[in-house]
Every structure is written in C-alpha cells, then in structure tokens.
Image (cartoon, rainbow, N blue to C red):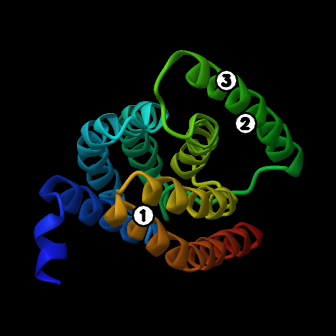
Amino acid sequence: MADLIAALSPLEVAAVVLAILYLVLAIRQNIWCWLCAAISTAIYVWILFTAKLYMETLLNVFYFGMAIYGWYVWQTGSHLKAGLPVCRWPLSVHLTALIVICVFSGITGYFLAANTDAAFPYLDSLTTVAAVWATFLVARKVLENWWYWLIIDVLSIYLFSQRDLQLTAALFALYVVMIPFGLWQWTLSYRGHAVRRQV
C-alpha cells in the first residue's frame, strides 16, 4: 500500500480531489463547482498531454473555458428566486446531437490515427466530442446531461486505465456511482420547478 501511495502523482491526486469536489457541488447545483472544475482541468491539461491523449487534452482546455462559461450562466441565472432552473430538451435535439457526435468522432479519430502517435484515437475522440456536448448541457442545467455522462464515464474508465492513469480511472468509476444521485437530485429540482410554475 505504501508503494502504491508513493507511486501516485501529486498533480493527479490534486486534479482528482478537485474533480470530485466539482461533481459533488454540481449535484447540489452549487456555483463553486465551476471553480473546482477550472483548477482541476488546468492540471489535467498537462497530465493528459504527457499521456499522449491529445483529444482529452483539448477537452480539458475546453473544460477550462466552460468552467468560466458555467460560472457566468449560473451567476446570471441567480437573479431568479431559485437560481437557474433545471430544464429538459426535446428528444429530437438529443438524437441530432448523437449523430453529430458520431460523425465528428469518426473524423477526428481518423485524423489522429493517420497523423499522430495518439493512443486510442477513436475512443479518445468519442469521449471528447461527447463530453463537449455534455458539458454544455451541464452549464445550461439540462437534466439529460447525466445520461451522456454515464456512457462517457464508463468508456473513460477503460481509456485511462490503459494509459496507466489508475487514479483517474478510479475517479471515473466514482463518477459512475455518483451519477444516479445527480440524476435524482436534478430530477427533483426539475419537478419542483414545474410544480411552482403551475401554482
């Protein structure tokens, strides 16, 4: 056990702890989740680049920008009595998004496979492109974001474990366990807001 602890990267530990705080706070719809996300993703940019997961590296650059965007959207929505409400988007939007995700994943995966030394170019691309969309849904407080994250996180467990990022793989396993709680909390919030609108 001592050898395992000694082998852990302090940077990866810090990134994982902040990422856990992000999800806990996001479940609670606490705006400070975005600060944790910003710091964690800044650390992960370096970690993932050195692991040759280039799409994941770009994804974390995007996450950093989305942390700023998420803070802004949630802050501007805070003038509402209960804050920015959880909402749902039509099935047609999600079906279109899935098609776009598959197409872009195929294109970027092919480019990485042909032009770089990227590890798992197609899987790396799929999780990255899907996460871009899912992160936008979180920033807009769209309930369905949790279903996207469930699939992304399951795939990410394999991806990171294959690149010897065991702590990060464990983080995503924890995410999978926490997602039902997020879905439940946000569903209650959505239903509560719907009831208030009817009163």
| Mark earlier in primary sequence (3, 1) | 3
Residue at 62% in and 43% down: 123
Q: Are marks 3 and 1 in contact (CB under 8 Å)?
A: no
For disc 3, the neighbor class at 10 Å (few under 14, some 14 to 19, many from 20) is some
Image location (x, y in percent) of residue 192: 65, 76
For disc 1, the neighbor class at 10 Å (few under 14, some 14 to 19, many from 20) is many
Label 2 residue SS:
helix
Q: Amino acid at mark 3?
A: Tyr
Residue sitting at the far top: 115
Q: Amino acid at mark 1?
A: Ala
Disc number at residue 110? 3
What residue did someone put label 2 on?
A: 101
Residue at 49% in and 65% down: 82
Q: Relative to 120, is 74 on the left or the right?
A: left
What residue did someone put label 1 on?
A: 169
Residue 179 position (above or below residue 69): below
Calculate the distance from the C-alpha at mark 3 to the C-alpha at mark 1.
25 Å
Q: Pick whichever, 133 or 102, lies toward us.
A: 102
Residue 191 position (above or below residue 57): below
Image location (x, y in percent) of residue 126: 64, 41
Q: Nearer the viewer, mark 2 or mark 3?
A: 3
Calculate the distance from the C-alpha at mark 2 to the C-alpha at mark 1.
23 Å
